[in-house]
Image (spheres, grey):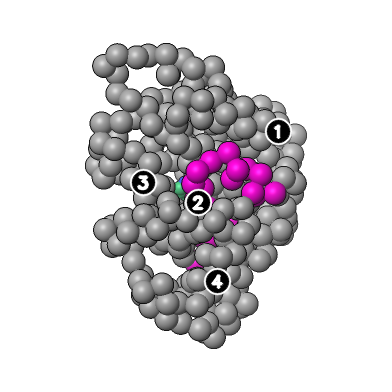
Amino acid sequence: MAFADGIADFRSDTVTRPTPEMVEAMASAPLGDDVYHDDPTVNALEEEAAMVTGKQAAIYVPTGTMANQLSIMFHTKPGEEILAHEGSHLRSVEAGAPQALSGVGFRTVSGDGGQITSADVERAMAMVGFYPRIRLLVWENTHNLSGGRVIPIETMEATSSTAREHGLSIHIDGARIFNAVAATGLPADRWAAVADTIQFCFSKGLGAPVGSIVCGEGSAIDEIRYLRKRLGGGMRQAGVIAAAARVALSERDRLVEDHVLARKLATVLAERFPGSVDLDSVETNILRIEFSKVGISWPELSDRLDGAGIKTSAPNGGTWRIVTHRDVDAEDVDRLISALA
Ligand SMILES: Cc1ncc(COP(=O)(O)O)c(C=O)c1O
């Protein structure tokens, strides 16, 4: 359902507002000082996240960016490189944080849908001598910039095993790992098992207002707790927001609804505007639409969308991105489709 002001916002799954259940949980959450590790609501959230991902421990942090950057700081030393997809969020759109904060560079690959193969790892590791040392392999699943594509578990297992043979550490940017879970039916701990650390976001499809979490071995999380303080990420009565994150995590099975909606929209667009959407690539809640095939200029469509109470991002590089989430429904999708007619 659209927001109370009638606006249906398809720009991102980050735009959701807290549900009444979340607000109620926030209002009644038991609180303490999380820097003293004393906030019972944060502690409960961390235990739940560790359990769901099959890791020993977890640490709640303000954003996905901080979760990724803390993980990079933990795994690497200045001068080293990260093996990652060229379109990975932590390399492309986290404001240069890996270079600025950890002093690391990237060795990139460009596989379809964010994929990295064992051959990619072998090729990268074969370059010996005075090349920067590669220390960390990073996965992003689902892969945002490719349109929420799921990296198959077989690929992650095979490539990670090769990376391990070369002594690499492994981190998963699982900002949307539960979309991968919803799309495949495979539990989160199966994906997390390939990695030393996994971060996921409560503030994306799960629908909470704030927060992400890093899960890993107890000793890793202890060190990341120290590094979190260094970055100013030690929050005090963070149970206020963690309470909403607990509700969001408990309702994660609803993500399939967002996928059904995205597919419905993709199917209509593909029928009406041939070549606009590759249906095979719509696996979760993000659509990438070839805007030139829609046959309308952006200024005109933008006016129509404004009139219909719909927000989307403007096309970027010819691609129009639409994202479904818990605050849009079938009626909103119909409105969007009518605006295109
Ligand atoms: C794949 C991925 N990782 C990390 C982030 C960063 O999350 P945040 O915006 O909470 O810093 C995002 C945000 O969109 C993302 O899509």
Does the rendering let one see residue 16? no
Q: Amino acid at mark 1?
A: Leu
Q: Magenta stretch: residue 205 in it?
A: yes
- Mark before the other along the chain sequence, 2 or 3: 3
- Mark before the other along the chain sequence, 3 or 4: 4
Residue 74 image label: 3
Q: Is residue 73 above or below residue 1?
A: above
Distance from disc 2 to disc 3, alpha carbons, whole Å, reads 11 Å
| Residue 202, position as x, y percentages in the image | 53, 60
Q: Is residue 143 above or below residue 223?
A: above
Distance from disc 4 to disc 2, alpha carbons, whole Å, reads 16 Å
| Residue 201, position as x, y percentages in the image | 51, 55
Report the quarter where the C terminus lies: top right
Distance from disc 1 to disc 2, alpha carbons, whole Å, reads 35 Å
Distance from disc 3 to disc 1, alpha carbons, whole Å, reads 39 Å
Residue that badge 2 annotates: 216
- Which residue is located at x 45 percent, y 77 percent? 39
Residue that badge 4 annotates: 44
